Image (cartoon, rainbow, N blue to C red):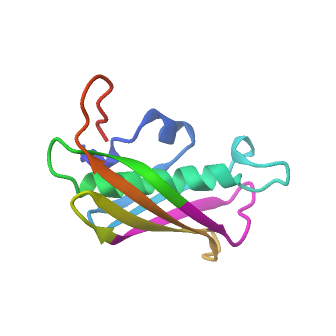
Amino acid sequence: MDKARQQPDYARKLGMVMISNSPDEIIMEMPVTRDLANRNGVLHGGAIMSLADNAGGTATFLNLETGLSTTTIESKTNFLRPIRIGDVARATCIPLHRGKTLQVWQSTITRGDGKVAAIVTQSQLVLEWKGEGKADG
């Protein structure tokens, strides 16, 4: 199994599915269920941010040298349109900057009709993880 498809339990619990992956682009989807909705019946903003964060973390992971890990240090979200229960949110994540100590990724979150629902830009710190609980992607 390729390392991008080895997703954390958190991503699986939210229903995230890897559609395609490469060091240059990650595409993931997440069904919009009642459990992930806000009181208005649309995908909760935190769930949108989780999808984007997981896509950006996975993208960074695919661009790391052996022995390095990553953590998100900044994230900015512009919410543009709602995604209703029963629809599917799709994250397409591309690099804006891939440095040795910092990577910046942009995830475009679209609805089933292809319209953009959110744009998320995040900064990922590249680090050497020491101690227990080493991140494995």
Tally the numbered discs.
0
Q: Which segment is the magenta one?
A: 76-96
Residue visible at 26% across and 25% down in the picture: 131
- Could you say which quadrant of the image residue 84 lies in? bottom right
In the picture provided, is 98 more to the left or to the right than 43? Answer: left
Where is residue 26? Give x, y as percent.
38, 62
Q: 11 and 122: which one is in front?
A: 122
Where is residue 128? Give x, y as percent.
22, 41
In the picture provided, is 100 more to the left or to the right than 33? Answer: left
Q: Is the N terminus in the top left, top right, bottom left or bottom right quadrant?
A: top left
Residue visible at 46% across and 58% down in the picture: 28
Q: Residue furthest top?
A: 132
Q: Is residue 44 above or below residue 76?
A: above
Residue 65 falls inside the magenta stretch: no
Q: Residue furthest bottom?
A: 115
Q: 43 and 32: which one is in front?
A: 43
- Could you say which quadrant of the image residue 78 lies in? bottom right
Where is residue 127? Give x, y as percent.
26, 45
Residue visible at 31% across and 42% down in the picture: 137
